[in-house]
Amino acid sequence: LKRSSDASEGAMGDEDSLSPTMAAERAVSAPVRMRRHASGPGGGEVIVKGSYDAALQELQQRVEGVVQSWVVQLMRDSDAVLVKCALLRGVTRLCLFFGRDRAESFLLPYIITFMTLPDARGWQLKTTILRELVGVAVFVGPQAFEKLLMPCLEPLLCDSQEPVVAEALNTLARLEELGLLHGAQLLS
């Protein structure tokens, strides 16, 4: 294989000679392309100058605002159990999107609030929360889970509805299998 010396191939040759670290740094600091919503001003494609981290942080702030407004609306509507369940089914993905620190500071308080709402007496909402707790616990870690979520889980073990108790026991079993609970925690 013979390389020609034209400018475009010379540029590729430079890219090929970069170390993986330098290539990653160049990729992170490159402008990020984002699509503007079709109904937005101008439509089409816009280039956001800055790093991937800055663009991600801006996107996280926007999504945080949307989630926050949904949660506020859902807390006012005690009949929206199925909508609350739908939002909670995506909470593990939201944890991944926000990262550990923001998940702990932003999402966990909402999860705790949903677990303790008066309309959380509905078995559908409680079982949905319990199914999602394993993914959240894996993401935030055992200390945050034990400190913040375990106190909300314990009363569900004595719930008056059988599906809730069964799901709470299943959640504890899965947490123990993953090493997120210790024998002492289970005995207490």
Image (cartoon, rainbow, N blue to C red):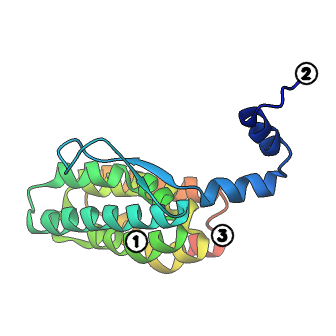
In front here: 17 or 103? 17
Q: Amino acid at mark 3?
A: His
Alpha carbons under labels 3 and 1: distance apart = 22 Å
Quadrant (top left, top right, bottom left, bottom right) of the C terminus: bottom right
User: Closer to the camera, 154 or 72?
Assistant: 72
Circle 3 residue: 182
Mark 2 secondary-structure assignment: loop
Tell me which corner region of the image, top left, top right, bottom left or bottom right, holds residue 173: bottom right
Q: Is residue 102 visible?
A: yes
Identity of the residue drawn at 42% across and 71% down: 154
Q: Which mark is residue 108?
A: 1
As measured in the structure, the alpha-carbon distance from the residue carrying label 1 to the one carrying label 2 is 58 Å
Residue 150 in sight in this render: no
Q: Position of residue 145 (x, y in %)?
A: 52, 72
Nearest to N terminus: mark 1 or mark 2:
2
- State the mark number for residue 2: 2
Q: Tell me the amino acid under the disc marked 2.
A: Lys
> Pointer 2: residues within 10 angstroms few (<14), some, or many (20+)?
few
* Rendering coords of residue 99 (x, y %): 52, 65
Residue type, numbered disc 1: Leu
Residue at 25% in and 68% down = 68
